[in-house]
Image: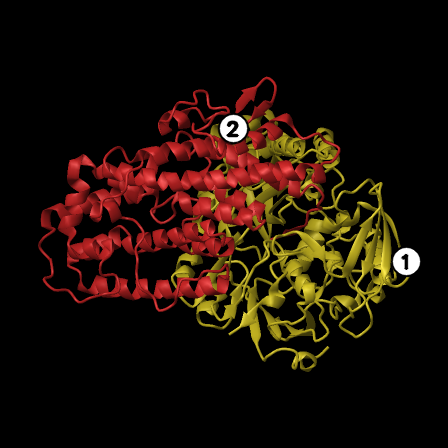
Amino acid sequence: MTLRGRGLALAVGIRALGMSALAGCTASPPSTALDGTWIATVARDPATFTAVVDADGAREGWIALHQNNWLATGSGAPSQRADAELTVLEDLLDRTNTQAVRTLAEGWPAHAPDVPVPAWLTASAQRLSRVETAATPSPFAVDSPEVTDPNALRAAYTVPNDDPTLGTFWDPTRPRALKRAYEARATPPPADLAGALFGPISVATSTSTPTTDDVGACRAFGQALNGVIDAGAEALAASAPPEGQALLRELGLVEVARSRTLTGLAVTALRAERPTCAAWYAQQALDHTAPRSITPTNSPTVYAVIAAANLQLGHVREALDALNVLRPKGADGYPEALGVIEAVSDLAVQQGMDRNGASGEN
Amino acid sequence: MSVALAAGTAGASQLRYAEDQTPAIVNPLFTSSMTETRVAELLFQSLYTDDHTLAAVPQLAESGELSADRQHMTVRLREDITWQDGSPFTARDVVLTVKAMKDPATASTEAARVSFIADLRESGTSAVEFDFVRPELRPEDKLTFKILPAAAVQTLPVKRTSPFRLNPIGTGPWSLSKFNDDNSISFAANPGYKGVDGKDDVGISQIVLKEVADKNYQAKLLLYESVDALVRVLPRDLAMLQSNRKVELYPYQTNSWWYGGFNLQRAPFDDPKVRQAVSQMLDVPDMLAPIGTGELITGPYVPSSPYYNHATKPWPHDAAGASTLLNAAGYQRGSDGWYKAGKKLSITVSAHRSLESAQEVTINLQSQLQAQGVEVAINFLDDPQWRQQVWRDRNFDFVLSQWTFDRNEDIREQFYSTGSRNLTGLKDAELDKLFDTARSTADPVVRKATFRQVHQRVHDDMPMVFLWTLDSYAALSTRVKNVTVHPFAFFTWANEWQMQ
């Protein structure tokens, strides 16, 4: 289903529930593995869900949050949740960008010994180091270093820098500036449904969380997690009132929760320097029937973590493939991703400079 | 070579994988399809191969020493390698393989991969001295072509029809044990296999390539456990497989794109106005929709490629514009089609019978063009017919096909005037210059920019209607463990796979 279609489905679902949300509430439902999660709350008590999404006129924002369309969440609770998501996204982009620029600069003498390192690349690497400890979001090429409004920053990021001494290039500090801007604006999520809705869930599995980058162990944990979620979802679907069941089905809530849980595991694994597991969790988080698109299950973060993990594993071309999903299309998307894409592109080209290609039909 | 030979090497485990078509021959000198590439990966090795980070590491090589001027290299060979018939692997095998690949009369499809080698010679039995055409920074990155036994390549020219094609001998983790009556091929683990970094064990004792010509049936066979692996899943089967907990999907980066290629050596397709008119008659998104999700392309790269030119605009789907172009090319619209000098505009669309979803696409294409007055015939070809008619005789109007590239996305052979895979016969001196610039530059930023110009130029020349790229997924039973899929050759690390 397309982004637009999903949004419509959510809107219709919410309106329908508003009329009869209390009709099917069960007094003492059987327990499931999903008890205590927001999915169980929504399924068993649709009225609570309706109250949250209708509060303060934030319905459109919740629709956008459900669709992972974080830049369209407006204000209020959905926007605060989106800020937290965007902080993670920009952190991942920054991580990828920094690694790409540094690897490109460091590898230049070995791959192109007869070509001087471009001035913009040297400057980029130096400025990345400097900005890591700088107080301002970006002392480098952002026009106004004091600007901390993410929207204003993003608006300035649609074109590359054109410096008379360095040439045309993309400011490598842009994702970091945005990350800091979102970080500054983000507030802790409330400890209620509004703070958890459409987010990851915590469920108990008999398989312990891996602590090494052993993909076999991560696969076993992921499969155990899937098993628990599958069983819990089945039990919940059978015991929830019709309106709750409709919500689960119509909004794909189980798959949303599964995806965001696996994405969270991927981000955690990446930050713990376990890129192989990060890549595996992220691939499991994706809905492969809607590849290369942002959907309620396929968030920008999942593509960003695939990119970061693959880059760390040396799979530059695969990183580029994931990043390309974030390439802005028209007015939509993340213009700051363009610079990251170009940095990783340059790295992919650099690493293939000495190779012959192979091809085959079909 | 018998199955029994390998029976004691590993546990009695068998992996059955589905291909659309069993390769007619097995000889890396003449590999042209991805099916053949995958089989070659099971049987043969290279001087250098990819490790899991896709960096070149020694495989048949022990070490390499590059001269100070970077134009000569001595590669010392491993002395513990034997061919699957028990004979030792030596420098002679390497020298004769390269000479066979370079031999014009042999017409190896892989000739371009050794074009950087000016000469080579044996230095004893365990070293080879290479002379390069120009200085090479990391020649090991290019020494990744498959090595054949000297006996198979010592008589030039090597023929495609050589008996080796049916009884190939390699040094790889598996040997070919039998072409079976049901069009399957059985491979047995090579007990003498020597892998990279001491990984000499082969986790799966037998592999069976099963031909499943009807791709619509492959996913069901996986669910019914009649096969254990699909190398390429149809987009429409993804949902069914993703929801099945006995199957795991493995996305991999193949850099594949579909195209409709014109024969530029044949009228009226030598006229760019006719090619553009045909292109503008086509509603490409409508052609893609029935076969699954994918991304439309405007040139010879996938959109995530560093070389893809995102500034290139797609040709419009514009029936009125197509009419204007045909008028300009001398055609007049008659009651039943377009005519020039009394001859009706007609086009025969040729497609390989094993190309997935080709039937839906060609029928849709036929319907679209016929509705606009172009007569269309469809010609599905089996593999020998495809090689003969399309590749050798160049006897076609328009081919529907797909190219798959490794991560280097080297399209030179497809579009350079003298390229060995220049099927359409495109000759564009300016384009050749761009390719030469890209090849000769040592600056990655210049190469990227130059290939983006190539993208635009090929788009403008229009030897092909560039169609789309589809996502590539393998699907394997969860009984197969420790799976890592190589993004191009698929089985590069299959010796590490295990069956539960």
Q: Nearer the viewer, residue B383 or B438?
A: B438
Of the numbered discs in the image, which one, if any, rests on residue B123?
A: 1
Q: Residues within 10 Å of mark 2 (few under 14, many from 20)?
A: many
Task: Name which residue type carries label 1.
Answer: Ser
Q: What residue appears at the point 63 percent right and 26 percent down from the top-left corner?
A: A119
| Closer to the camera in the image, B26 or A357 | A357
Q: Is residue B256 visible?
A: no
Residue A12 vs residue B67: left or right?
left
SS at badge 2: loop
Chain designation of label 1: B
Q: Residue furthest top?
A: A164
**Label 2 vs label 1, nearer the camera:** 2
Q: Which mark is residue A171?
A: 2
Q: Is residue A261 above or below residue A171?
A: below
Can residue A42 be seen here? The reply is yes
Structural distance between the alpha carbons of marks 2 and 1: 52 Å
Q: Colour of chain B?
A: yellow
Q: Is residue A260 left or right of residue B41?
A: left
Residue B29: x, y in percent?
76, 57
Q: Position of residue B317 (x, y in %)?
A: 48, 33
Q: Tell me which amino acid carries mark 2.
A: Asp
